[in-house]
Image (tube, grey):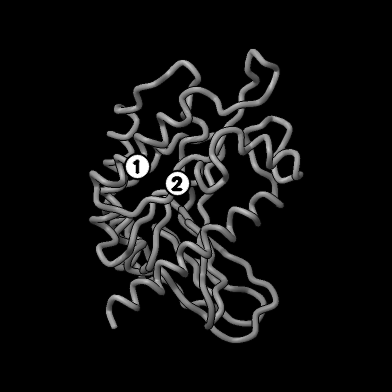
Amino acid sequence: PVYIADSSSADSGSHVAAPRASASEMSGGSVVAKSVSGRIGSFRLTASGGSSSRVYGVALDGKAGVSVDNFSMRGSAGYHLTQIPVSTLKGFAQVRPYDLIIIQFGLNVANAKQKDYSAYIQKMGQAIDNFKAAFPHASILVVSMGDRGKRGSDGQIHTMPGVQELVSYERKMASDHRVAFWNLYEAMGGDGSIARMKEKKQANLDYTHINFEGGKYVAKLLFDVLVNGKDNYNKREN
């Protein structure tokens, strides 16, 4: 287990005490990580410093397998990523040196009346550049928005206007910034796929959000893409 803080100290309460961060480590608001080992059934973080204390999180990783940090931002267009100082990102890179960073936004950006998303990808492109600068050894994958439905004049659910345009802009953004791209919209089945997933009880009645079953389905698609990509890479290298 690891805790990450930028201006406070903490300890683990139940079985093992985490070492405290020194004053020199805490100065300047740098990102600091402390590790503990042993059997831990519960823990407590104690921060000092009043309003200046900030604890980013706790990682309860095992020693084998794949570790995933999911930073879910509900209702976000992704603009907040550009507001994270590169120095903070570099601090995280020291304590959480990711192998792969996946960026996926767009569901809250697509608009039935909008066709031009150049301003959006300009902002998100800056976020990608910041992550590339902070995590130079990490691969970055942009996942497009998925399908989003809108009832048409025929009474049927079709892909909302603006979705395919945004997916095209996201593909261009990934290409311009030289990072990988996966088309979730096409992987789901393209036009009207969210309606078909809803019939399979994989999406909600809003024809916008997939549910847990839909998440399992999409996750398997992405997992297979990643594994096949790695296998193809190994074949080329050999």
Residue 101 percent coordinates (x, y): 40, 58
Q: Which residue carries the number 2 mark?
A: 183
> Residue 91 falls in which quadrant of the image?
bottom left
Residue situated in front as seen by the camera: 28 or 223 = 223
The quadrant the N terminus occupies is bottom right
Q: Residue at x 40, y 71 (%)?
A: 230
Q: Which residue carries the number 1 mark?
A: 171
Residue 142 percent coordinates (x, y): 39, 49
Q: Is residue 162 left or right of residue 156?
A: left
Q: Is residue 180 left or right of residue 206?
A: left
Say if 11 sits above or below 150 in the image: below
> Residue 158 falls in which quadrant of the image?
top right
Q: Which mark is residue 218?
A: none
Q: Residue at x 64, y 71 (%)?
A: 43
* Dot 1: element: helix
> What amino acid does circle 2 point to?
Asn
2 and 1 marks in contact (CB < 8 Å): yes
Q: Is residue 137 left or right of residue 170?
A: left
Say if 197 sits above or below 166 in the image: below
Q: Residue at x 36, y 39 (%)?
A: 170
Residue 221 percent coordinates (x, y): 55, 58
Label located before the other in sequence (2 or 1) = 1
Residue 223 percent coordinates (x, y): 53, 63
> What amino acid does circle 1 point to?
Arg
Of all residues shown, which one is farthest toward the top?
153
Residue situated in front as seen by the camera: 56 or 219 = 219
